[in-house]
Amino acid sequence: QVQLMESGGGSVQAGGSLRLSCAASGDTRSVDCWGWFRQARGKEREGVARIYTSAGSPFYAESVKGRLTISQDNANNTLYLQMNSLKPEDTAMYYCATRLYVYYCTTDPAFFEFWGQGTQVSVSS
């Protein structure tokens, strides 16, 4: 079991930045895949970034590539999402999620086992 708690959301103007954090507890050493997702009102949840703990480069959705950066602080069991050059279309509830004991990683929400409660990001034009 892994417990996740997101923080760092807020309201910013277009072009601004936010840094989301996801504090993890529980069986974090068994986590192989970490992801950030978002869900705008009336839309399906979509993966924006993911990272495989053991190896490989992070993966980003095309809509956020070059603006969002996923990173890990393993010593503090925290996942981050640095969000720069924010756009109004980035407005959504943002969630972090994990999957244990796997040899690959995706951005398919159905792949992930444990979820945080979400943090709201609102970007005004």
Image: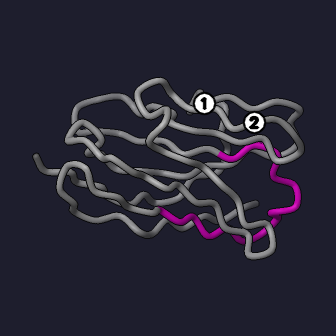
Residue 40, percent from left and from top: 28, 39
Residue 4, percent from left and from top: 60, 64
Crowd band around label 2 with a 10 angstrom C-alpha radius: few (<14), some (14–19), many (20+): few
Residue 119, percent from left and from top: 38, 60
Most frequent secondary structure within the magenta stretch: strand
The outermost residue toward the bottom is 76
The magenta stretch is 20-34
Placement of 107 over or under 79, stated as above or below? above
Amino acid carrying label 1: it is: Thr
Q: Which mark is residue 64?
A: none
Which residue is denoted by mark 2 in the rendering?
57
Residue 108, percent from left and from top: 59, 27
Q: In the rendered view, does 69 fall on the left or right side of 117?
A: right
The mark nearer the N terminus, 1 or 2, is: 2
Q: Nearer the viewer, residue 48 or 66?
A: 66
Query: Which picture quadrant has residue 92?
Result: top left
Placement of 62 over or under 28, stated as above or below? above
Which residue is denoted by mark 1 in the rendering?
107
Q: In the rendered view, does 112 fall on the left or right side of 39?
A: right
Q: Residue at x 51, y 33 (%)?
A: 47
Amino acid carrying label 2: it is: Ser
Q: Nearer the viewer, residue 11 or 104?
A: 11
Q: In the rendered view, does 89 fall on the left or right side of 35?
A: left
- Callout 1: helix, strand or loop? loop
Crowd band around label 1 with a 10 angstrom C-alpha radius: few (<14), some (14–19), many (20+): many
Q: Residue at x 57, y 38 (%)?
A: 49
Q: In the rendered view, does 124 fall on the left or right side of 116?
A: left
Q: Nearer the viewer, residue 42 or 37?
A: 37
Placement of 18 over or under 61, stated as above or below? below
In three-dimensional space, the C-alpha distance between marks 1 and 2, rounded to whole angstroms, equals 14 Å
- Callout 2: helix, strand or loop? loop
Residue 57 drawn in magenta = no
